[in-house]
Amino acid sequence: MVVHYDEQTPHLHAVVIPILKNQSGKRRLNAGAWFDNQREKQADGSYKTTENRMEIFQDKYFKAVSKKHKLKRGDKVSSHEGDDTYTPPSHEQIQDLKRRTQAADLLASIKTPQALKDAHKEIDGMKRSMNRKLRAARRAGEEAKADELEATLSGFKQQVKKLKSEVNNLFDSNVQLHADLNDANQQVKQLKEENEALLSTQAELVETIRIIKNGSDGNTI
């Protein structure tokens, strides 16, 4: 068993050797007894799953560790129970979905030029990772996988390009708003100065009226 920290979530890999005794008492490898689904043949010739051993194994594991580590049980694939035509998603498909989701979440979080600048390093890392996987798939001759990765990478690049344009437009609008705000502040300042001048003139007029009203000898006219 070994613990890995090479992904966002720490995880461990364990090698389990399913050695079981057969009826004669001999030990032999029997992974199917642990993990293969138990099935029964139906009257029409088809097979029906009567026991999902992998799910039972996962349930037992969850019960053993959930209370101690406060874990939540993952979603069960109950909608496909008994459907022998169902093919579960591969590890690569799941990882591709995670990459798409991570990229979408990152792009959605960028709203300002500074946020885009801060995210550049992570965006570049994503593109490098996708390119490495793409080249590896091409070298291995896995054309379908490579095409899917190339489409994902192309879509991601288009999203980044579009986002940069939107952020630049936002930046330009922000600059214009600041300019408009500065103009408004200048106008307010000018209006305050004019208002103060009017108040000063008003005070002078009031004083002039008071003097005229009282007369030069102090007696009321």
Image: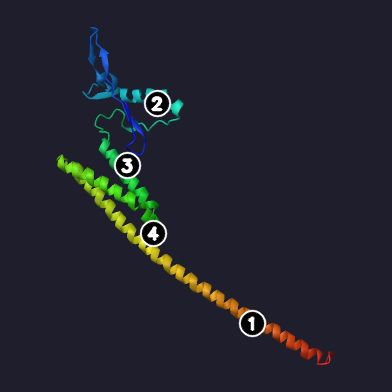
C-alpha distance separating marks 3 and 4: 26 Å
Position of 163 relative to 1 (above/below): below
C-alpha distance separating marks 1 and 2: 80 Å
Camera-nearest residue between 75 and 67: 67
**Residue type, label 4:** Pro
Between marks 3 and 4 in the image, the one whose residue lies nearer the viewer: 4
Q: Which mark is residue 98?
A: 3
The picture quadrant where one finds residue 34 is: top left
Between marks 1 and 2 in the image, the one whose residue lies nearer the viewer: 1
Label 2 SS: helix
Q: Which mark is residue 198?
A: 1
* Mark 3 vs 1, N-terminal side: 3
**Residue type, label 2:** Phe
**Residue type, label 3:** Lys
**Which residue lies under the disc numbered 4?**
113
Q: Residue furthest top?
A: 24
Image label count? 4
Q: Residues within 10 Å of mark 3 (few under 14, many from 20)?
A: few
Residue 214, horizontal then vertical, whole percent = 81, 89
Q: Is residue 100 visible?
A: yes
* Mark 3 vs 2, N-terminal side: 2
- Asked if the residues shown at circle 3 and circle 4 are in contact, with their CB atoms under 8 angstroms apart, the answer is no
- Asked if the residues shown at circle 4 and circle 1 are in contact, with their CB atoms under 8 angstroms apart, the answer is no
Between marks 3 and 1 in the image, the one whose residue lies nearer the viewer: 1
